[in-house]
Image (tube, grey):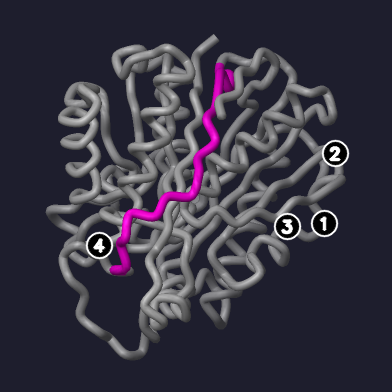
Amino acid sequence: MTFKYKNVYVGDTVTVAGPYEKNGPLKKYYDKTFNDLYFGEDSWEKAEIKAIKDNLGLMVRKIGKTKSDVDLVIGGDLLNQISASTYGCLGYGKSFIGVYGACSSSALEIILASNFIEAGQIKDAISLVSSHNMTSEKQFRNPTEYGAPKPSSATFTATGAASIYLTNVKTDVRVESATLGKIIDYSENDPNNMGRVMAPSAIDTLKRHFEETGRTPDYYDLILTGDLGIYGKEILKDYMLKKYNYDLSKNYNDCGVMLYDLEKQLEVLAGGSGPVCSALVNYGYIYDQLKKKKIKKVLLVSTGALFCPTLIYQKQNIYSIAHAVSLEVV
């Protein structure tokens, strides 16, 4: 299902990043960074909450609002009961919606906020996502104290919080259209190969976006998937060309590949993941390029793996989903 928008604009963005992201190639595009994973707190969960609070504080100052001025705040993260968002967003916005789309949450939030704004039900919204390497790793894979080695196909959960302010007041960048994804089961069950797990959902959403809009890949200056990493990225490119004759060789990249220096930061293995992975790239570097009009049309396809460890232990497949958002310079 694809939506078209006429009255949804990007007012501003804020990015708060952790130490691994700070040491990556996009460090100059972050509003705030931390030198360690604790952020001055005594637990990793509290550190993630602090990243959210710091992000929202920076955002309301940037847009010249008070905490309660914004009609809606939407938050999403990976912790149980999306608790980082609920604790971190306390006191912000006239209303709050918590969403769980795993690593696809940033695009899902933009779609939800844009639909409300386009319908005239609200005038503005802040959409925020977060993740933390240590909180995510111990919840979804192994206890971090275990120190288990990982295969080269594993991705590295990004640390930080990133937000986007959407408004009905005209700016230089607008949300042009969006395509909602659907749950995909491709019989994958390896939590250490998320690129392979999520590539099928990105392929499905891209195909439907092109069909429903009547566009081809060359309509966009840049097409970005969320966090497929180096292996998932190649799966998507090969499949889209061989199966559907969509050539992505000239204008496609993956945020999980862009977030880190994969040749120097060997600990990230196949690349970045987590809700904040694509958001740090898109709300930092990509938004900067749009404002400077170095690129004018971008399709963001955030991908997510929908699973819990309990079901993996019960030999169930890992499902995935992807949502697409088109941003254009006005």
Q: Quadrant of the C terminus?
A: top right
Which residue is at 48% across, 33% downward? 324
Q: CA distance from mark 4 to mark 2?
A: 39 Å
Seen from the viewer's position, the closer of residues 140 and 12 is 140
Q: CA distance from mark 3 to mark 1?
A: 6 Å
- The reply to whether dot 3 and dot 2 touch (C-beta < 8 Å) is no
The relative height of residue 90 versus residue 218 in the rendered view (above or below) is below
Q: CA distance from mark 4 to mark 1?
A: 35 Å
Considering the whole magenta stretch, tell me its main secondary structure: loop
Which residue is at 48% across, 50% downward? 183
Crowd rating for badge 3 (residues with CA inside 10 Å; few <14, some 14–19, many 20+) = many
Question: Residue under circle 3?
Answer: 89
Seen from the viewer's position, the closer of residues 58 and 145 is 145
Q: How many badges with numbers are in the image?
A: 4
Crowd rating for badge 1 (residues with CA inside 10 Å; few <14, some 14–19, many 20+) = few
Crowd rating for badge 4 (residues with CA inside 10 Å; few <14, some 14–19, many 20+) = many
Q: Secondary structure at mark 1?
A: loop
Which residue is at 72% across, 66% downward? 87
Q: Secondary structure at mark 2?
A: loop
Q: Secondary structure at mark 3?
A: loop
Q: Secondary structure at mark 4?
A: helix
Q: State the residue lying farthest toward the bottom.
A: 146
Q: Residue 268 — which label?
A: 4
- The reply to whether dot 2 and dot 1 touch (C-beta < 8 Å) is no
- On the rendered structure, is 29 left or right of 46? left
Q: Earlier in the sequence, mark 4 or mark 1?
A: 1
Residue range in magenta is: 173-190
